[in-house]
Amino acid sequence: MKFSKTALLLAFAAATAVLVSPHPLNAQDKTVDAPELLHPSADSWPIYHGDYSGKRHSPLTQITPQNVHRLGLAWAFQTDQGASIKSTPIVANGILYFTVPDNVWAVDVRSGHRIWHYQYHPNKGLHIGQRGVSIYRDWLYFLTPDAHLISLNAKDGSVRWDVVVADVTKGYWTTMSPMIIGNHVIVGVSGDFDNLTGFLRSVDAETGKTQWQWNATPPVGTPDSTTGGMTWMTGTYDPELNMLYWGTGNPTPVLNGKPRPGLDPYTCSIVALNPDTGKLVWSFSASPHDTHDWDAVETPVLVDRDFHGQPRKMLMQTSRNGYFYVLDRTNGKSLLSTTFGPVNWSLGLDNQGRPIPNTEKEPAPDGRLIAPDEGGLTNYRSPSFDPKTGLFVVDARPSYGIYFAKPADGTFGWAGADYGVWSKGVIEAIDYHTGKIRWKHEVGQHGSGAGVLTTDSGVTFTGDADGNILALSTADGKTLWHAGTGSPMQSSPISIEIDGRQYVITGSGGVLFAWALPDAAGESAATTRQGN
């Protein structure tokens, strides 16, 4: 079944003005406490990745490869804010919460009816995007473009407290969905200026007071040290090991490695921290001495399975630099390091499984052709791990770019420039034992920007560059269903089941879409709501 853009517009125009009463919040609603975050129920998606593991895999099975062709639009919610939805919605007690910069909405997940809308005041932060809110007990946690952390009442959107995370006048901003572990609200920062240190901070969930801070780089002035290491995206957590896993960003100056010789530790790295103290347990350098702006902030996915016949607690990452890593997450040791697309910037691997940078592939005045380009072989969009097939499914982007060495421009401290020359978007399914690609599904010349969701029934949901939501067979990548939404997805799908009905929820442009199989009357009850 395919919905064209015109068909969707006609559906919106034909939708009745009858308002569906929102699901009431009452004393019987369950609190989103530590047990719910550890083991989310089928009717909730309480944290950014769905659960702490980062697998983005749904155990739901109502939507199958056999019936997904009947999927239809249940409702659509229009934000009317002029910003694309890049957030992952969360769902608790039948209420869906999602964001664009400066804005949070609470929406009835059954009907798409708005319950409340919070709008932050105008500010000078960078409005590049917003990944979503987090919830703990009756409180939401929201990061603003000017680097504030705000706690909102989940019932009505009123502000409980507002604390400053970083100084926006120095070039910091914040976009991520915070991570909740017990009474810790873990937040990180963004920014690309020289002399800024990336960090993770834990604040008290009740008071907003700082509990600890971990800096991704040594103090300024340390010999051969660097700045940078921003912590852009939400990490993952192993409750058994009580270990927090996070990816860090590039060192600065961004494309010039001469002022910062060595490996530039803790930048472009995967790090493991104690969430109670912020102490570093181990680190793995995904891009040693990065000179191509390849942040390693992509999701560190936690998987417990056999690896070459031995039970392992693993961490997997498809990194922006083009490498697929499988680590033992108890100690950070490499189990597998291999490429998942064209890569020409390294000389191979060292004895710790880290790429060895080729100095001949650093930016130069006459240019260097590099694979992948600055956007990376993947980026912030979330991958998914399917436990049934053992496939790691990722939105990849094989590409080439030309990097030049130039004087720093003074604004961002970049000592060079990069120009993309070719790219192609593909959804790839990787065998984690070997790193081999089991199947590919092309999604457009420049990639889709969409994340991936797998389900227990064998359906994978994602998007393409033409503005389609896609349902693929997890086994072989073949298209099972697609629907046009008018704009490419820039977020990751989620799925929940409520009142016996499974919903798949996606964002496209400024519209949030809920998809479901026909209801008991045999029709998809399509409605549209506006965010104002």
Image: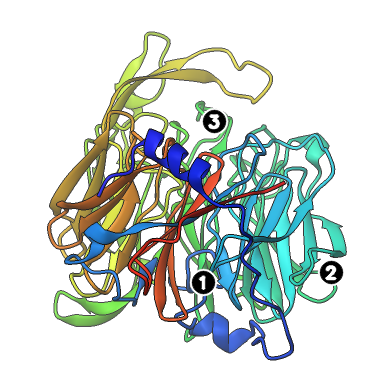
For disc 2, the marked residue is: 209
Q: Residue at x 65, y 39 (%)?
A: 80
Question: Three-letter amino acid code at disc 2?
Answer: Lys
526 sits left or right of 325 in the view: right
476 sits left or right of 407 in the view: left
Is disc 2 placed on a helix, strand or loop? loop
Residue 421 position, x and y percent, is 31, 18
Q: Residue at x 74, y 35 (%)?
A: 171
Categorize mark 2 by other alpha carbons within 10 Å: few (<14), some (14-19), many (20+): few
Question: Three-letter amino acid code at disc 1?
Answer: Trp
Q: Residue at x 35, y 57 (%)?
A: 72
Residue 343 position, x and y percent, is 25, 36
Residue nearest the viewer, comparing 372 with 357: 372
Residue 456 drawn above or below residue 19:
below
Q: Nearer the viewer, mark 2 or mark 3?
A: 2
Question: Three-letter amino acid code at disc 3?
Answer: Val
Q: Are marks 1 and 2 in contact (CB under 8 Å)?
A: no
Is disc 3 placed on a helix, strand or loop? loop
Is disc 1 placed on a helix, strand or loop? loop
For disc 1, the marked residue is: 45
Q: Residue at x 49, y 81 (%)?
A: 40
Residue 42 position, x and y percent, is 44, 80
Residue 341 position, x and y percent, is 22, 41
Mark 1 → mark 2, Cα distance in angstroms: 27 Å
For disc 3, the marked residue is: 254
Q: Please identify the residue farthest to the top as the structure is shown.
A: 366
